[in-house]
Image (cartoon, rainbow, N blue to C red):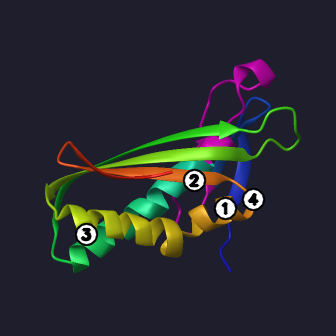
Amino acid sequence: MIRIELDRVNGDFGFEAKDAYGHTVHLDSSPESGGANFGVRPMQMLLMGLGGCSGIDIVSILNKQRQTVTGFHMTIDGEREKGKEPTLWETVHIQFDLKGEIDPDKAKKACQLSMDKYCSVAATLREARCLITWEVVVNNQSVYRCQ
């Protein structure tokens, strides 16, 4: 079991969350809904978790394939449902930008394995009926686009 502790530390909605290892994150609501812009919105943190989870998978897979990853950047765009409560993520699109001595086919396969098999956050979002699409760019050359 993992324990997360959360304390209100700033205004009504400014919280500090701490994981079992002492790492902290600040969370808050938007100023439009009474927050003070003290931290990350919780739903945006879910997309950050998606990025971290898949990024760890992809770099690990490429390292095992003896690929040299010298740069890794990811852009995640999400759209939430409209007119519903709760407003879940409806669509998410990820662009993986990789740099280094990387075989494009291995990069595509590593991203595919992460998105379809290993990334627990992606699986959680898909269970909530979120459509996740993604694309891979290696050394500024488009390699693959999953629609």
Going from N to C along the chain, the mark reached first, 1 or 2, is 1
- The amino acid type found where label 3 is placed reads Lys
Residue under the image location 22 percent in, 73 percent down: 63
The answer to whether residue 15 of the structure is visible from this angle is yes
Going from N to C along the chain, the mark reached first, 3 or 2, is 3
Residue that numbered label 1 is attached to? 126
Q: What stretch is highlighted in magenta?
A: 18-45
Secondary element type, mark 2: strand
Residue that numbered label 4 is attached to? 128
What distance separates the C-alpha of mark 1 from that of mark 3?
24 Å
* Label 1 close to label 3 by CB (< 8 Å): no
Above or below, 22 relative to 130? below
* Label 4 close to label 1 by CB (< 8 Å): yes
Residue that numbered label 2 is attached to? 132
What distance separates the C-alpha of mark 4 from that of mark 3?
29 Å
Above or below, 116 relative to 31? below
What distance separates the C-alpha of mark 2 from that of mark 4?
11 Å
- The amino acid type found where label 1 is placed reads Arg
Residue under the image location 30 percent in, 66 percent down: 59
* Label 1 close to label 2 by CB (< 8 Å): yes
Crowd around label 1: few <14 · some 14–19 · many ≥20 (10 Å): some
Residue that numbered label 3 is attached to? 106
Residue under the image location 66 percent in, 59 percent down: 125
